[in-house]
Image: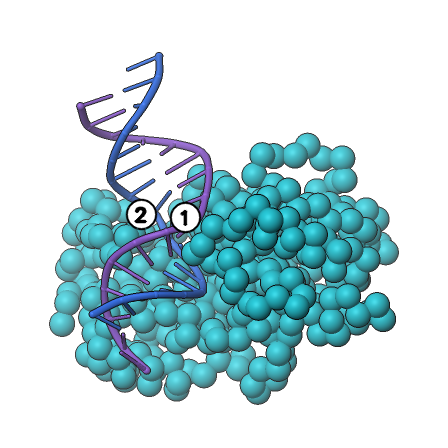
Chain colours: A cyan, B purple, C blue
Amino acid sequence: MPELPEVEVVRAGLAPAVTGARVLAVEVMDPRALKRHTPLGEEPGLGGHGSTLSEETGRGRAADFERRLTGRTLTAPLRRGKFLWIPLAVDTGGLAGPDTALLAHLGMSGQMLLRATDAVDDRHVRIRTWIEHPDHGELRLDFSDQRLFGSLALDSLTPTSPVGSIPAQAAHIARDPLDPHFDDAGFVAAIRSRSVGAKKLLLDQRIVSGVGNIYADETLWRARVHPDTPGSAVSQRGAVALLHHLREVFDQALLEGGTSFDEQYVNVNGQAGYFAHSLNAYGRGGEACPRCGTAIKRVPFGGRSSHYCPRCQRKR
DNA sequence: GGGCGCACCTGTAAGC
DNA sequence: TGCTTACAGGTGCGCC
């Protein structure tokens, strides 16, 4: 389940292979992997996330995506939270627009895999891209996604404050805590101004991006905060500590190559990360808390699960 | 505007 | 053995 550390590992893995590479060909094998892609001249959001693509809409999107990406040169990949994008170098044809990026969201099971051009396919590859790099020669970049929650798109870049630019579809999300321009004070104020539970707030990408179910549970465990503690009940000091622990968890996960369960997440070479071995709460329902020995509790949380220690993380 | 629930999707495991 | 059901979960949309 790719969250910030996993997406960052993918970004760093892609960088040397795609920066400066030219797209030779694109094949969309499953248009459902283009849910976020809007063809030129079409209104954004038609047939988008949450609705099923008609066959005709899917074919149109696939054709538009293939036509506009083929022949373009890729630049260095960038990331905010769980969104990853590769800006396209300015071309003179004007097919993709002057400030366009190849945007990727991995969803739950999406993978960006760098492979030899003659590598064997797996059945979950949804979009194949052949690229040619001046130093590395021809490669294949496969977007594989078992559960189809992820997608690729071509999207226009929009300026973002105080520096840089971002695909329009990701413009609404906050910076992530590893971003040097992250607003610490804004985070603390946002947490303390809301009445909903701390876990919901950590998962709100408009407050802080990059956090998913795994790292929310781990951060709350480290900070000794109950997932349902209202944001307004978190002290100034507590909110600062929450941010500190979030950064700590992300840093450690990055060092260990991310969290892999059941091959749901691998890096660009298909290798798993090791952070799953370092988890203290997530996925450990019924096991002893590493801090106090009390059994970790697993409770339903909006269609998924929360894991916490009922002793270390008491509800206030 | 905030909060909540649902839809999207597929592989796996459990239950019958 | 084979079928059905539940579950995993990030995002966006609609409703209250």
- Which amino acid, mark 1? Ala
Of discs 2 and 1, which sits in the foreground?
2
Residue A30 vs residue A293: left or right?
A: right
Q: Secondary structure at mark 2?
A: loop
Residue A171 position in % (x across, y down): 53, 75
Quadrant housing the C terminus of chain A? bottom left
Q: In this rendered view, identify the residue nearer to me: A143 or A100.
A: A100
Q: Chain of mark 2?
A: A
Q: In this rendered view, identify the residue nearer to me: A275 or C15.
A: C15
Q: In this rendered view, identify the residue nearer to me: C6 or A222.
A: C6
Q: Where is mark 2, residue-wise?
A: A283
Residue at 73% in and 49% down: A26
Q: In this rendered view, identify the residue nearer to me: A5 or A94.
A: A94
Q: Secondary structure at mark 1?
A: helix
Residue at 20% in and 57% down: A309
The number of discs equals 2
Residue C4 position in % (x across, y down): 27, 29
Mark 2 vs 1: CB contact within 8 A: yes
Determine if marks 2 and 1 fall on one subunit.
Answer: yes
Residue A277 vs residue A119: left or right?
A: left
Q: Badge 1: few (under 14), some or many (20 or more) residues near its Cα, within 10 Å?
A: some
Q: Where is mark 1, residue-wise?
A: A276
Q: Quadrant of residue A9?
A: bottom right
Q: Is residue A155 visible?
A: yes
Residue at 70% in and 42% down: A115
Label 2 and label 1: CA atoms lie apart by 9 Å
- Which amino acid, mark 2? Gly
